[in-house]
Amino acid sequence: MAASAVQLLLFKTTMKLIKLIAILSLVAVSFSSDVLAQQKKIPKNPFRFSDAVTGKPIPEVLVLPRYSSAKGIFIAPEGPAKATYRNYLAKPFLYRNETPFKLKTPKFVGLPLLPVFIGKAGGIEGILIVAPGYRPIWFDNLWQTRDILNTRDIRNLRLTPIPDDQWSLLMEKKLNPLIEESAVSIDDFQFWGLNKAEGLYIGYNKDERALIKKFLQPVKVKDQAGRPSC
């Protein structure tokens, strides 16, 4: 009887522990469901970039994702109770035209302490598409590939060429800071798809800044005739 009682107690304790783990997992999921659902829905369908004037394909573009995060204390199911919010740029990459689109998304981390959750949740807000000599495009509908009437592919984008002087000004005012600075100018919030003037941090490491610089400022070499060319 004593052995049976111990076994029964161990069984009940184990079941309670399993239930507790399940509840904690559900709590964690409740905070991350929106983020996880958002990320899972981002399709890998290719983007197609072309010159808006000539119609010729643009072989490669620079993709600059903008993310947001909330870090602090959350209460299920209401959400953040005391949290700090942050908009930031991270994980830039070069994208080859008409190849599968693979976007790196932020991880969800935290500690569930029923019913309070302490952690950090993040999401992708959109991407800025940049190609030398063209006006950048802000694109935030990453979770669909067709328009609302299903009549066209919204990933078929035409970039508008701009004069050299406009490109140089764009580089100086908006793109060069990405190579050197830790934050974007407060005046550029519309350029980055923000609804209001708020902080936008640049979370690029040394290699990522070098990648951006190399793509936007290619080293000029001389051809056989001695003329400078890219």
Image (spheres, grey):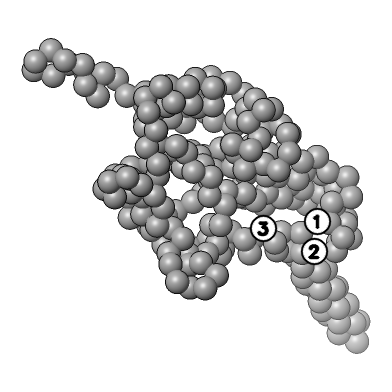
Q: Dot 2 corresponds to which residue?
A: 27
Secondary structure at numbered mark 3: helix
Q: Would residue 143 be seen by someone viewing this image from the given angle? A: yes
Q: Residues within 10 Å of mark 1 (few under 14, many from 20)?
A: many
Q: Residues within 10 Å of mark 2 (few under 14, many from 20)?
A: many
Q: Dot 3 corresponds to which residue?
A: 35
Q: Quadrant of the C terminus?
A: top left
Lower sequence index among marks 1 and 3: 3
- Identified by mark 1, the residue type is Pro
Q: Which mark is residue 112?
A: 1
Residue 65 location (% of width, % of height): 54, 43
Q: Residues within 10 Å of mark 3 (few under 14, many from 20)?
A: some
Q: Is residue 98 left or right of residue 33?
A: left
Residue 45 falls in image quadrant:
bottom left
Residue 208 location (% of width, % of height): 46, 31
Q: Which mark is residue 189?
A: none
Q: Is residue 167 left or right of residue 186?
A: left
Name the outermost residue toward the top.
226
Do the CB atoms of the residues marked 2 and 1 lie less than 8 Å apart?
yes
- Identified by mark 2, the residue type is Val
- Relative to 185, say whether 33 is above or below: below
- Identified by mark 3, the residue type is Val
Lower sequence index among marks 3 and 2: 2
Q: CA distance from mark 1 to mark 3?
A: 16 Å
Q: Residue at x 59, y 32 (%)?
A: 203
The mark lying in front, picked from 3 and 2, is 3
- Relative to 3, say whether 42 is above or below: above
Q: Quadrant of the N terminus?
A: bottom right
Name the outermost residue toward the left.
224
Do the CB atoms of the residues marked 3 and 2 lie less than 8 Å apart?
no
